[in-house]
Amino acid sequence: MRLQELTRELRNRPQDKVSIPVPEVPLVFRGQTQQGREVPKSLVSNLRICYPLPGGSALVNFEDPKVANQVLQQKEHKIDLEECRLRVQVQPLELPMVTTIQVSSHMNGRRVLVTGLPTGLRLSEEELLDKLEIFFGKTKNGGGDVETRELLHGGVMLAFAKGEVAQNLCRIGQFTVPLGGQEVPLQVSPYLSGEIQKAEVRYQPIPQSVLVLNLPDVLDGPELHDVLEIHFQKPTRGGGEVEALTVVPPGQQGLAVFTSESC
Protein backbone atom coordinates (compact mmCIF):
# COMPACT_ATOMS: atom_id res chain seq x y z
CA MET A 1 0.00 0.00 0.00
CA ARG A 2 2.87 2.34 0.75
CA LEU A 3 4.11 2.07 -2.86
CA GLN A 4 0.65 2.88 -4.25
CA GLU A 5 0.39 5.92 -1.97
CA LEU A 6 3.84 7.10 -3.07
CA THR A 7 2.89 6.57 -6.73
CA ARG A 8 -0.29 8.65 -6.36
CA GLU A 9 1.64 11.35 -4.52
CA LEU A 10 4.26 11.56 -7.26
CA ARG A 11 1.63 11.64 -10.01
CA ASN A 12 -0.32 14.45 -8.33
CA ARG A 13 2.77 16.48 -7.56
CA PRO A 14 3.70 19.12 -10.17
CA GLN A 15 6.75 18.30 -12.22
CA ASP A 16 9.95 18.95 -10.33
CA LYS A 17 12.44 21.25 -11.99
CA VAL A 18 16.03 20.82 -10.95
CA SER A 19 18.92 23.05 -12.02
CA ILE A 20 22.08 21.03 -12.53
CA PRO A 21 25.39 22.91 -12.60
CA VAL A 22 27.81 21.52 -15.15
CA PRO A 23 31.44 21.32 -13.96
CA GLU A 24 34.11 23.01 -16.02
CA VAL A 25 36.22 20.57 -18.04
CA PRO A 26 39.49 21.64 -19.71
CA LEU A 27 39.26 20.94 -23.44
CA VAL A 28 42.06 20.32 -25.90
CA PHE A 29 42.26 19.89 -29.67
CA ARG A 30 44.32 16.84 -30.63
CA GLY A 31 44.19 17.22 -34.39
CA GLN A 32 41.06 15.13 -35.02
CA THR A 33 38.75 16.51 -37.70
CA GLN A 34 35.78 15.41 -39.77
CA GLN A 35 35.56 16.88 -43.25
CA GLY A 36 32.71 17.19 -45.70
CA ARG A 37 30.66 19.74 -47.58
CA GLU A 38 27.78 19.76 -45.06
CA VAL A 39 28.35 20.05 -41.33
CA PRO A 40 25.92 20.84 -38.50
CA LYS A 41 26.24 23.70 -36.06
CA SER A 42 28.40 23.28 -32.96
CA LEU A 43 27.51 20.06 -31.20
CA VAL A 44 27.71 19.70 -27.44
CA SER A 45 27.92 16.34 -25.74
CA ASN A 46 29.20 14.97 -22.48
CA LEU A 47 32.48 13.84 -24.05
CA ARG A 48 33.36 16.24 -26.79
CA ILE A 49 32.57 19.47 -28.62
CA CYS A 50 32.66 19.62 -32.41
CA TYR A 51 33.50 23.06 -33.77
CA PRO A 52 32.66 23.80 -37.44
CA LEU A 53 35.62 24.97 -39.53
CA PRO A 54 34.83 26.89 -42.73
CA GLY A 55 36.66 26.41 -46.00
CA GLY A 56 39.92 28.32 -46.27
CA SER A 57 40.72 28.07 -42.56
CA ALA A 58 43.15 26.32 -40.25
CA LEU A 59 43.20 25.49 -36.57
CA VAL A 60 46.54 25.66 -34.76
CA ASN A 61 47.03 24.25 -31.27
CA PHE A 62 50.19 25.27 -29.43
CA GLU A 63 51.84 23.43 -26.54
CA ASP A 64 52.15 26.69 -24.58
CA PRO A 65 49.10 28.99 -24.21
CA LYS A 66 51.49 31.96 -23.96
CA VAL A 67 52.59 31.31 -27.54
CA ALA A 68 48.99 31.37 -28.75
CA ASN A 69 48.51 34.70 -26.98
CA GLN A 70 51.64 36.10 -28.65
CA VAL A 71 50.43 34.99 -32.09
CA LEU A 72 47.08 36.71 -31.49
CA GLN A 73 48.75 40.04 -30.74
CA GLN A 74 49.20 40.42 -34.50
CA LYS A 75 45.78 40.12 -36.17
CA GLU A 76 47.20 39.72 -39.68
CA HIS A 77 50.13 37.48 -40.53
CA LYS A 78 52.16 37.72 -43.74
CA ILE A 79 53.61 34.47 -45.04
CA ASP A 80 56.17 34.75 -47.84
CA LEU A 81 56.17 32.10 -50.55
CA GLU A 82 58.40 31.81 -53.61
CA GLU A 83 56.01 33.57 -55.96
CA CYS A 84 53.57 35.39 -53.67
CA ARG A 85 52.76 36.50 -50.16
CA LEU A 86 49.85 35.17 -48.14
CA ARG A 87 47.92 37.52 -45.88
CA VAL A 88 45.94 35.57 -43.31
CA GLN A 89 43.95 36.65 -40.27
CA VAL A 90 44.09 35.01 -36.84
CA GLN A 91 41.54 35.12 -34.06
CA PRO A 92 40.98 33.38 -30.72
CA LEU A 93 38.80 30.29 -30.56
CA GLU A 94 35.79 30.18 -28.23
CA LEU A 95 33.63 27.10 -27.73
CA PRO A 96 30.00 27.00 -26.53
CA MET A 97 29.86 25.39 -23.08
CA VAL A 98 26.69 24.37 -21.24
CA THR A 99 26.91 25.76 -17.69
CA THR A 100 23.47 24.94 -16.26
CA ILE A 101 20.71 22.55 -17.32
CA GLN A 102 17.17 22.74 -15.93
CA VAL A 103 15.42 19.38 -16.07
CA SER A 104 11.79 18.53 -15.31
CA SER A 105 11.07 14.96 -14.21
CA HIS A 106 8.00 12.77 -13.73
CA MET A 107 7.34 9.11 -12.99
CA ASN A 108 5.79 6.86 -15.63
CA GLY A 109 3.41 4.41 -13.93
CA ARG A 110 3.76 1.66 -16.56
CA ARG A 111 7.53 1.69 -16.88
CA VAL A 112 10.31 0.31 -14.72
CA LEU A 113 14.09 0.57 -14.74
CA VAL A 114 16.10 -2.65 -14.47
CA THR A 115 19.63 -2.12 -13.15
CA GLY A 116 22.56 -4.20 -11.92
CA LEU A 117 23.53 -5.70 -15.27
CA PRO A 118 27.15 -6.85 -15.07
CA THR A 119 29.73 -6.08 -17.72
CA GLY A 120 31.03 -8.89 -19.86
CA LEU A 121 27.72 -10.63 -20.52
CA ARG A 122 28.07 -12.69 -23.69
CA LEU A 123 24.77 -11.50 -25.07
CA SER A 124 23.90 -9.17 -27.91
CA GLU A 125 21.55 -6.26 -27.22
CA GLU A 126 18.59 -8.10 -28.74
CA GLU A 127 19.37 -11.31 -26.83
CA LEU A 128 19.57 -9.39 -23.56
CA LEU A 129 16.29 -7.57 -24.16
CA ASP A 130 14.58 -10.80 -25.22
CA LYS A 131 15.64 -12.62 -22.06
CA LEU A 132 14.52 -9.76 -19.82
CA GLU A 133 11.19 -9.54 -21.63
CA ILE A 134 10.64 -13.29 -21.22
CA PHE A 135 11.54 -13.25 -17.52
CA PHE A 136 9.52 -10.17 -16.58
CA GLY A 137 6.67 -11.20 -18.85
CA LYS A 138 5.92 -14.26 -16.68
CA THR A 139 3.20 -13.90 -14.06
CA LYS A 140 5.06 -16.28 -11.73
CA ASN A 141 7.85 -13.69 -11.56
CA GLY A 142 5.37 -10.93 -10.80
CA GLY A 143 5.43 -9.64 -14.38
CA GLY A 144 3.06 -9.25 -17.31
CA ASP A 145 2.84 -8.25 -20.95
CA VAL A 146 5.80 -6.12 -22.03
CA GLU A 147 4.93 -3.47 -24.61
CA THR A 148 8.32 -1.86 -25.21
CA ARG A 149 11.88 -2.28 -24.02
CA GLU A 150 15.00 -0.17 -24.44
CA LEU A 151 18.64 -0.58 -23.50
CA LEU A 152 19.87 2.51 -21.67
CA HIS A 153 23.18 3.60 -20.27
CA GLY A 154 23.38 1.64 -17.03
CA GLY A 155 20.12 -0.29 -17.30
CA VAL A 156 17.09 -1.38 -19.29
CA MET A 157 13.67 0.28 -19.50
CA LEU A 158 10.64 -2.02 -19.67
CA ALA A 159 7.11 -0.71 -20.34
CA PHE A 160 4.15 -2.92 -19.42
CA ALA A 161 0.59 -2.97 -20.71
CA LYS A 162 -0.73 -2.57 -17.16
CA GLY A 163 0.49 -0.18 -14.52
CA GLU A 164 -0.22 -2.68 -11.73
CA VAL A 165 2.50 -4.96 -13.11
CA ALA A 166 5.12 -2.20 -12.94
CA GLN A 167 4.05 -1.34 -9.37
CA ASN A 168 4.24 -4.96 -8.32
CA LEU A 169 7.74 -5.40 -9.73
CA CYS A 170 8.92 -2.24 -7.99
CA ARG A 171 7.42 -3.49 -4.73
CA ILE A 172 9.38 -6.76 -5.02
CA GLY A 173 12.51 -4.86 -6.03
CA GLN A 174 15.08 -7.67 -6.12
CA PHE A 175 15.23 -10.46 -8.72
CA THR A 176 17.65 -13.20 -9.74
CA VAL A 177 17.57 -13.55 -13.52
CA PRO A 178 19.35 -16.22 -15.64
CA LEU A 179 21.50 -14.36 -18.17
CA GLY A 180 24.36 -15.71 -20.26
CA GLY A 181 24.67 -18.94 -18.29
CA GLN A 182 24.74 -17.29 -14.86
CA GLU A 183 22.29 -16.15 -12.20
CA VAL A 184 22.38 -12.36 -12.10
CA PRO A 185 20.89 -10.30 -9.24
CA LEU A 186 18.96 -7.34 -10.67
CA GLN A 187 17.08 -4.43 -9.16
CA VAL A 188 13.77 -3.01 -10.42
CA SER A 189 12.79 0.56 -9.56
CA PRO A 190 10.31 3.19 -10.82
CA TYR A 191 11.22 4.81 -14.12
CA LEU A 192 11.63 8.58 -14.07
CA SER A 193 11.48 10.52 -17.32
CA GLY A 194 13.34 13.80 -17.65
CA GLU A 195 13.09 16.63 -20.15
CA ILE A 196 15.49 19.53 -20.56
CA GLN A 197 13.53 22.75 -20.05
CA LYS A 198 16.35 25.25 -20.19
CA ALA A 199 20.08 25.25 -20.85
CA GLU A 200 22.46 28.13 -20.22
CA VAL A 201 25.43 28.40 -22.57
CA ARG A 202 28.52 30.56 -22.32
CA TYR A 203 31.52 30.77 -24.60
CA GLN A 204 34.80 29.53 -23.18
CA PRO A 205 38.09 30.60 -24.79
CA ILE A 206 40.55 27.82 -25.60
CA PRO A 207 43.88 29.35 -24.56
CA GLN A 208 46.10 27.04 -26.63
CA SER A 209 44.22 27.33 -29.93
CA VAL A 210 44.28 29.89 -32.72
CA LEU A 211 41.91 30.03 -35.70
CA VAL A 212 43.48 31.07 -39.02
CA LEU A 213 41.13 32.51 -41.67
CA ASN A 214 41.16 33.65 -45.32
CA LEU A 215 43.52 31.00 -46.64
CA PRO A 216 43.62 31.33 -50.45
CA ASP A 217 43.45 28.43 -52.88
CA VAL A 218 47.09 28.62 -54.00
CA LEU A 219 48.56 25.44 -52.47
CA ASP A 220 47.28 21.94 -51.95
CA GLY A 221 46.44 20.75 -48.44
CA PRO A 222 49.73 19.08 -47.41
CA GLU A 223 51.86 21.97 -48.74
CA LEU A 224 49.71 24.57 -47.01
CA HIS A 225 49.87 22.55 -43.78
CA ASP A 226 53.68 22.56 -43.85
CA VAL A 227 53.88 26.27 -44.72
CA LEU A 228 51.61 27.21 -41.81
CA GLU A 229 53.38 24.94 -39.35
CA ILE A 230 56.78 26.41 -40.26
CA HIS A 231 55.44 29.96 -39.98
CA PHE A 232 53.76 29.54 -36.60
CA GLN A 233 56.77 27.75 -35.11
CA LYS A 234 59.11 30.67 -35.80
CA PRO A 235 59.91 32.65 -32.62
CA THR A 236 60.44 35.74 -34.81
CA ARG A 237 56.73 35.58 -35.67
CA GLY A 238 55.77 35.16 -32.02
CA GLY A 239 55.29 31.43 -32.56
CA GLY A 240 56.46 28.29 -30.81
CA GLU A 241 55.99 24.54 -30.66
CA VAL A 242 52.87 23.44 -32.57
CA GLU A 243 51.07 20.50 -30.97
CA ALA A 244 48.40 20.00 -33.65
CA LEU A 245 47.39 21.73 -36.87
CA THR A 246 44.62 21.04 -39.34
CA VAL A 247 43.78 22.76 -42.62
CA VAL A 248 40.38 22.94 -44.34
CA PRO A 249 40.92 23.86 -48.01
CA PRO A 250 38.64 26.40 -49.72
CA GLY A 251 35.38 24.85 -50.90
CA GLN A 252 35.32 22.30 -48.09
CA GLN A 253 34.12 22.26 -44.50
CA GLY A 254 35.27 20.39 -41.43
CA LEU A 255 34.71 19.75 -37.74
CA ALA A 256 37.43 20.15 -35.14
CA VAL A 257 36.82 17.69 -32.31
CA PHE A 258 37.69 18.90 -28.79
CA THR A 259 37.78 16.39 -25.93
CA SER A 260 38.58 16.64 -22.23
CA GLU A 261 42.26 16.40 -21.36
CA SER A 262 41.64 13.08 -19.58
CA CYS A 263 40.27 11.40 -22.73
Image (spheres, rainbow, N blue to C red):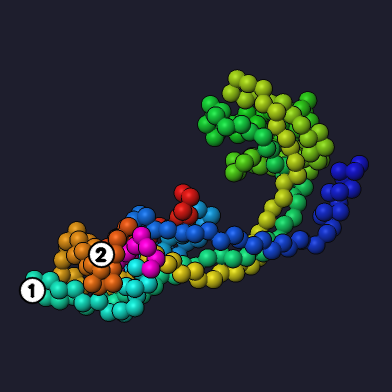
Whether the magenta-drawn stretch holds residue 208 is answered as no
Q: Position of residue 170 (x, y in %)?
A: 79, 39
Seen from the viewer's position, the closer of residues 147 and 225 is 225
Query: Is 118 positioned to the left or the right of 32 in the image?
Result: right
Residue sitting at x 63%, y 21%: 182
Q: Please give the label number shown on residue 233.
A: 2
Mark 1 vs mark 2: which is more N-terminal?
1
Residue sitting at x 8%, y 73%: 83
Query: Which residue lies most toward the right here?
Result: 1
Q: Please give the label number shown on residue 83.
A: 1
- Which quadrant of the figure has residue 219? bottom left
Amino acid on which disc 1 is placed: Glu
Q: Position of residue 104 (x, y in %)?
A: 71, 61
Tell whether label 2 touches label 1 (CB within 8 Å). Answer: no
Q: Secondary structure at mark 2?
A: helix
Query: Is 144 positioned to the left or the right of 262 in the image?
Result: right
Seen from the viewer's position, the closer of residues 78 and 256 is 78
Seen from the viewer's position, the closer of residues 183 and 139 is 183
Q: Which residues are magenta?
A: 56-66
Q: Secondary structure at mark 1?
A: loop
Residue sitting at x 82%, y 37%: 171
- Which quadrant of the figure has residue 236? bottom left
Q: Position of residue 197 (x, y in %)?
A: 65, 65
Amino acid on which disc 2 is placed: Gln
Q: Position of residue 172 (x, y in %)?
A: 81, 33
**Res. 205 visible in picture:** yes
Query: Which residue lies most toward the left here?
Result: 83
**Res. 162 visible in picture:** no
Query: Which residue lies most toward the top here?
Result: 181
